[in-house]
Image: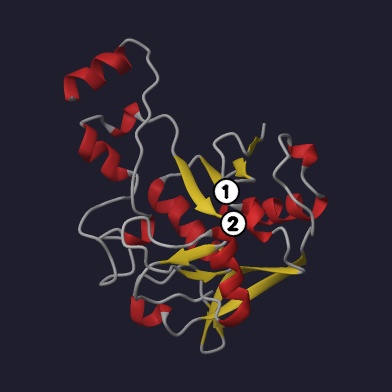
Amino acid sequence: TVNLLHEAVGGGASVLLEGAQATFLDIDHGTYPYVTSSNPTAGGACAGSGLGPRDISRVVGIAKAYTTRVGAGPFPTELHGELGARIVDIGREFGTVTGRRRRPGWLDLVMLRHAVRVNSLTDIALTKLDVLDDFDIIRVCTGYRLDGRDLDGYPDDARILEKVECVWEELPGWRTALRQCRKDADLPAAARHLLEIVERHVGVPVSIVGVGPERDDCVVRS
């Protein structure tokens, strides 16, 4: 497939490479030892396809409007009790292959900012925003503290990550269904405010917003 891909790129064709797994399951950049055995970060696309870094013109990071994890490992924004159960039930958060219940938590912008760095993300597709439609209050983690001291970035050590405290930004929910939204202007002000917070903290635009389970349930932002 290497020659096929290079001929396509050389001929001006659009080529889409899709990565499985997630940044923090990366064997080198994830929450080791709670990781997979490969590099699902964007650099793995070059290693797997035979295309070089200069052939990649856009890197879209796909993230949920909240955080989930399957199995063990540190999880600073993890939600327990009724709130966590609501996200699992509404978002149908069960492993695709194993059927295991995913662990839910609020959106972690420290992790997302780090994912932007290690993947050289150009923009973000934020999915499942509609799962938060019925929440009165939505929280977002914007920083970490350890022993009363603000951390400069994401700690590359699972033992430290287990001990951090989250710095929260709290905003009111929009309390309305987003599924019919197709333009940025269709989104409630509270939902747009959440997107602004994400963009401000991670440094790249949110270009696509998922507002429902179907393929065309999305807002493509200019």
Q: Quadrant of residue 174?
A: bottom right
Residue drawn at x 29%, y 71% is: 34
Residue 82: give its label.
Answer: none
Which of 119/182 is in front? 182
Q: Quadrant of residue 1?
A: top left
Q: Is residue 214 left or right of residue 32?
A: right
Instruction: Residue 12: give x, y in percent of width and height.
Output: 37, 12
Q: Amino acid at mark 1?
A: Leu
Which of 75/150 is in front? 75
What count of labels does the image hold?
A: 2
Residue 197 appears in the figure: yes
Q: Is residue 194 above or below residue 180?
A: below
Residue drawn at x 57%, y 54% is: 202
Q: Secondary structure at mark 2?
A: loop
The answer to whether the residue labelled 2 contacts the one labelled 1, judged by CB atoms less than 8 Å apart, is: yes
Instruction: Residue 74: give x, y in percent of width and height.
Output: 40, 77
How crowded pointer 1 is (Cα within 10 Å; few <14, some 14-19, many 20+) is rated as: many
Which of 89/37 is in front? 89
Residue tagged 1:
126
Residue tagged 2:
65
Report, in whole angstroms, how far the alpha carbon at label 2 lies from the one at label 1. 6 Å
